[in-house]
Amino acid sequence: MRQFLLVVAAILGFFLISATALYLLATSRPSALIYDDTCPPPCWLGITLAETSPWEVMQILVEAPFVDQGSIRQAGDPPATDHITWRFRRPVRDLAGYVYFTDGRASHIRIVTLGAMSLREALEKYGEPEAFWLQTRDRPAERWTQLNIIYPEIGCLLEIRFDYTGKPAPTSVSLTGGTLIRAITYFDPGDATALFPIPVDEFLEWQGLTRVPLPMPTQ
C-alpha cells in the first residue's frame, strides 16, 4: 500500500511539474521589443528611422524568426509605400507590427503588444517617463480611457487602455507594475509632433505608479 501511494504521489508530482512548466512557458514569452535588442530605441530590429527603406524593412522582416512571413503586407509601391504590416509568432506574444514611411524612409514603428509587455517591464527597459496625456471615449458601444506615456528624448510612446464598455465610467484608474501595455510606438525624437493630438505644453507630469484622476469622457 505504501509503495502504491508513493507511485501515485510521484505521478501527481510529475503532472504538477509539467503543468507548471507549460504555464510558465505560455506566460513568459516576451514582447518582441524585449526579445530583440539589435539596436537601442527608437531603432528596432535594425530598422532605423529616417534611414531604412521599404525594401530594407521587407528584407529584415523576412529574416526575423518571430515574424509570420506569410502575413507581411506592403501598402503602396516604392517609393510611395505608406506602411508595411505583419503578424508575430512564437516565441514572442505581440499581435502585429507596422512600419510607416515618409519620403521613402521609415518614419515610425508601431508594435501592437496587447499585453505582451507590462508597465513594470516598460519602466525597466525605458526608465521613468517624463509626461503623459489622457484620451477618453464615451459611446454606447465604445467606452474607454487611454493613457499615453511619452518619452520625448528616446522617441517612445506607450499606450495603456482601460475599457469600461457597459460599466459606469470610473473617476480614476490605477497604474501598477502589472498594468499591461496595449501598443508601443517608436518615433523620431526630432520630428514627432504629428503623433501628438494635443500641444506638448498640455502634457501632464508623470507621477509614477499611482491612481490617475480621469477627465470627463468625450463623445
Image (cartoon, rainbow, N blue to C red):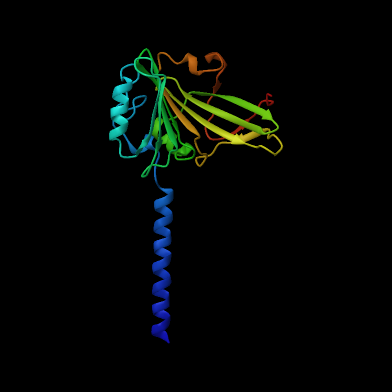
Q: How many marks?
A: 0
Residue 134 in sight from this viewpoint: yes
- Residue 58 picture location, percent across and down: 32, 27
Residue at 46 percent of width and 38 percent of height: 120
Along the line of sight, which residue is nearer the eye, 60 or 137? 60
Name the quarter where the C terminus is drawn.
top right
Q: Name which residue lies at 41% across and 67% down.
A: 15
Decide: is 37 above or below 107.
Answer: below
Residue found at the far bottom of this picture: 1
Q: Nearer the viewer, residue 117 or 88?
A: 88
28 w.r.t. 120: above or below: below
- Is any atom of residue 39 visible in this view? no
Query: Measured from the top left, where is residue 80 in percent x and y?
Result: 38, 15
Name the quadrant containing residue 126.
Answer: top left
Q: Position of residue 124 (x, y in %)?
A: 41, 36
Give the quadrant of the N terminus: bottom left
Q: Position of residue 49 (x, y in %)?
A: 35, 20
Depth order, front residue of 68/28 = 68
